[in-house]
Image (spheres, grey):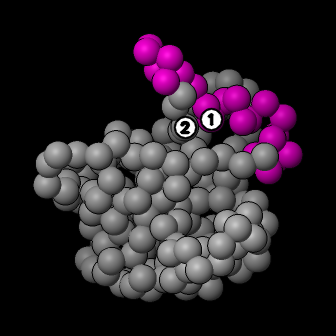
Amino acid sequence: MNGKVIAVHVNASHTFSKQSVWQIILLKGLGVEGDAHCGATVKHRSRVARDPSQPNLRQVHLMHGELFDELSEKAFSVLPGDLGENITTRGLDLLSLPVGTELHIGEHSVVTLTGLRNPCAQIEHFQAGLMKAVLGRSPEGKLLRKAGVMGVVTTAGPVSSGDEITVKMPPPPYRELEMV
């Protein structure tokens, strides 16, 4: 199972969208260099308010580019980086991967998946109706969160648009991604 990086993004401030850049640098145990969410402990404002000593399981946000196609079909205008992801991918079903999956990106970087992104209320301020569009229900009625996955940097290195992504599954039994 392989995919590709189609865009990379960073933002030093705690605003919703991130700027598209030609390359980001992943820092082991910290996240994306220069990004507001970079650090060993939580940086998300609501999580910091609850307990600033929590480990940062949301160092890198990855989103599948196929979501933008789906949103476009529903008349939303959303581009890579608009929803706050650091890495936009194509060709990988990120949401189906288990906790502990390693994404080997480019020649050096490795991101280990920790969970699902829980879309926050800011998404509705970005475009009305978008929250409902990035949530769904499985045939069994289970809530589906489609706003990407979160991970931690386990091997540092650069990530650029066009980089290949190779998936290394963790040993079974697999644990389904949950909100982090």
Residue 73 is left or right of residue 116, and the answer is: right
Pick whichever, 2 or 110, lies toward us: 110
Question: Could you say which disc has been placed on residue 145 in the image?
Answer: 2
Instruction: Tell me which amino acid carries mark 1.
Output: Val
Question: Could you say which disc has been placed on residue 134 in the image?
Answer: 1
Instruction: Tell me which amino acid carries mark 2.
Output: Arg
Disc with the residue nearer the chain's start (1 vs 2): 1
Q: Residue at x 19, y 54 (%)?
A: 169
Label 1 neighbourhood size at 10 Å, few (<14), some (14-19), many (20+)? some
In the image, is residue 135 part of the stretch drawn in magenta?
A: yes
Residue 75 is left or right of residue 27, and the answer is: right
Label 2 neighbourhood size at 10 Å, few (<14), some (14-19), many (20+)? many
Q: Which element carries disc 1, helix, strand or loop?
A: loop
Q: Residue 128: which quarter of the image?
A: top right
Q: Position of residue 131 (x, y in %)?
A: 72, 36
Q: Residue at x 81, y 41 (%)?
A: 124
Q: Which residues are magenta?
A: 122-142
